[in-house]
Structure formats: structure tokens, C-alpha cells
Image (tube, grey):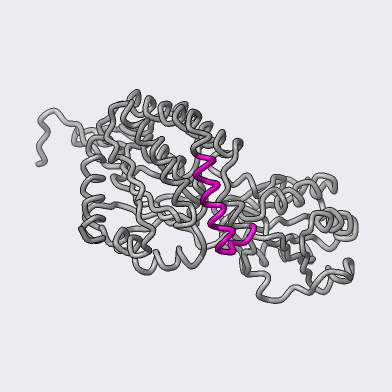
Amino acid sequence: MTLQEDMRHLGQHAREAAQLLARSTTLSKNNALEAIAQQLEQQQDTLLAANAKDLEAGKAKGLDSALLDRLALNDSRIASMVEGLRQMIALPDPIGEITDLNYRPSGIQVGKMRVPLGVVGIIYESRPNVTADAAGLCLKSGNATILRGGSEAIHSNQAIAQCIHAGLAAAQLPQTAVQVIETTDRAAVGELIRLSKYVDVIIPRGGKGLIERISQEARIPVIKHLDGICHTYIDDKADIEKAIAVAYNAKTQRYGTCNTMETLLVAEGIAKQVLPPLAEKYQSVGVELRGCPATQALLPNIKAATDEDWDTEYLAAILSIKIVIDFDDAVEHIRLHSSQHTDAIITEDWSRARRFLTEVDSSSVMVNASTRFADGFEYGLGAEIGISTDKFHARGPVGLTGLTSQKFIVLGEGHIRN
């Protein structure tokens, strides 16, 4: 069987499974999620052993520390996968929900019913936890899914897939509801994004190069974000202790994630009080600082920031810093350089906080909180299928509702149109 034929069969199986899932009960879907969670717990040693193979291969290939961090599984990350699945069980099932039902002058009732998208194709790199998160979210929202993880995580993803299939079988749901592509052949991605007869939407998760390629070549609608150039603005009405704590966390809690702060903006009226102690904390953990001329005047030992720095997602222990004149200057910098992923303000002035929420056009906008909270798990979505910076259909962390659509329904009693 050729790769093209193999991918077409995956699509056919997914379409058949999607029809079954669309009419599955909430109980059967929840039973499957619990069975998968139990399998992940029971097979933890197997998962760690498979992940160790991937990590060893990754080190041999020279993957950098940020990529290795995203690739790694440990007890805590497996526990988070399990907790994410159990959060999904507790969430209301959106499928079949009817809203906006009202009578029209003709006597008919018109409303909307929430329905699955159908078959979701997900292409991702490095993080094996995406396999469990994506499978769970698609399952709960009544969608079949075809998953294509990165070659660097092949052993981890296949081990997780075995747990998923065992859980589906235990709940008497089709194992083809979640299919993890086994080949590492890059051509499989090209085939998947052209399966318009069987796949309803593609969600890429990974580097900018991958997402740009998928967006350009796909013959299927794409839910995406290209990069995460996230800002934190420390206003001159900020609480200094709070500002230092939040800005430090936004950069250092994890370096290789799309919601990590990449640019720190500081109002000039508070810069002398905030930047020296904050820079000391950053440098104590090895963060390289790059600053504008005003920042360098306060921190003479840091590198100069270039124009390119303001548009760079580092995904590493590097931070660009700019001292801005005031609130308006900060918002203008964000308008010019933000990727519309996540941006935050630290301030005790609520009128400025409200203006920031209104004027900053990003998928997540925060007040007095670390950008690292821009995450489906933290938002109570159970997990996320990805972050969308698009403005149509879904925006921000894409959870259960983001994997559904609505159709109009009409209720009548033999009504005819005159």
C-alpha cells in the first residue's frame, strides 16, 4: 500500500468513526476518557521508557535544551495529562446543546444546535502530552481525530496511543476514533492536509516554519497561531513587588512555550525602581537581557536590543527590554510587534487596566497576571488543542467549544410558507 493509499484509509476510518462519535452519549465518552486516564497511570513506566528512547535519540541529533524540555515526560507531566482528561470528564458536554430558540412571526421556532466539527487533523512537534490532550478533547467534543506527532517523539506518541486505544476499547468506542500516524515520513503531512474529502479542519502546533507551511499548502481550513511574541507592560502605577514577581515568572517559569514573555516593557517613571532588582533575578538564573538605550543606561552590562529583537520569539532564556514613555507608548509598541497571542499589564490603576483590556487586540489580555496562564488547562478547558490567534471560529486556547460548530434548527407543526 502506498503512503497516499494508507492516508486515504486513515481518512475513511476517521470519517466512519466520527459518525459514531457524533451520536455517542456523554456517559460513553466520559467512560472512555476515564479508561484512557487509568491506562496512562498504569502504563507510566512504559511511557517513561519510551520517552527515554526519544530523549536519547534527540540528544544524539543535537536537539537544543528547549526542544528536549518540550519532548520530555516525567511523573508530573504524566499526572497532568491524567488530570487534564479527568477535568474534561467534569466539563459539560457541548454536543446537542440548543440555544437561541425563539418563535418567528410565521409560528416556527428557530434556534441553534451545537455539533462536532467531524474529523480533526492535528500536526504537532515535540510535546508528547499533546497526543493525550488532543485525543481527549476531540473525543469529548464528538470528533474523530488523526494525529501526526513529530518524528522526535515517535516512541512516546505510540506508547500513549496504545493507552488511548485500550481506553476506547474498554468503553466500546471505535479505536479509529483516534488514529496516530505511525510513519515518520514527512510526506504524510502533505497527504493529511489534502484529505479534504475526509478531514474537516487542520490544527498545526509547532514552530513557525511548520505552521506557515501548513497554512500555505492545506486544502482544509486551518486553526493556527504562527508565534507567541508575548509582552508584559509594567505601568508606573504598578505595585513594585507584584510587578517583579509576575515579570520574573512570565519569563522563567518555562522558556520554550508560546505563552512565555519575550519582551518586557517598563514605564520610565518606575524603571529605576523595578529594573535593577528584576535584572538581578533574571541574571541569577542565566537569562540573557537585551535592552533599548534607556534600559542599557540603567543596566550597563546588558546587550543592545536590535529592531529584530522586538519581533523575535526566542523560546529560550533571552529577554528584550524596552523603557517606554507611558501607557500609550506601551500599547503602541504592542500594536506594532505583538503576535496577538498574549499580552499583560501590571498596574494598580483600574482605568488603565480597563483601557489595556479594550485596546490590546490579542487572543488573551491579562491584568496583574503572568502570561504563562494563557493555557487551556489553566483556563478550565480541561486542556487545549492549541492556541488560535485567528479571529474567526475560535480564538485563544481552543477547548471543547472551539472544536464544535452550530447549525440552525427549525421546529414547526406542519407550517408552510405563504
Percent x, y of residue 263 = 70, 62
Left or right, 376 with reference to 120: right
Q: Tell me where the magenta segment starts and ends, as one range.
A: 47-65
Left or right, 58 with reference to 202: right
Q: Residue at x 69, y 47 (%)?
A: 370
Eyeballing the image, is 409 above or below 321? Answer: above
Q: Which corner quadrant of the image does residue 300 belong to? A: bottom right
**Which residue is found at the position 52% from the left and 34% from the top?**
44
Q: Nearer the viewer, residue 302 or 225?
A: 302
Residue 145 vertical placement versus 107 (above, below):
below
Would residue 188 be visible to someone looking at this image? yes
In x, y percent, where is residue 4? 24, 61
Q: Is residue 186 above or below residue 198?
A: below
Magenta-drawn stretch, dominant element (helix, strand or loop): helix
Pick the residue in front: 167 or 410.
167
- Counting from the top left corner in percent of width and height, residue 110 is at 25, 36
Q: Quadrant of the C terminus?
A: top left
Q: Nearer the viewer, residue 213 or 191?
A: 191
Viewer-nearest residue: 221 or 144: 144
Residue 250 shown in magenta: no
User: In which quadrant of the rendered image does the N terminus lie?
Assistant: bottom left
Residue placed at 44% from the left, 46% from the top?
A: 157
Q: Residue at x 62, y 55 (%)?
A: 256
| Res. 171 image quadrant | top left
Q: Is residue 390 visible?
A: no
Instruction: Answer with left or right where residue 212 lies relative to residue 121.
Output: right
- Find residue 362 and report its horizontal and vertical position in percent: 57, 56
Residue 57 horizontal side relative to residue 311, left or right? left
Q: Is residue 59 magenta?
A: yes
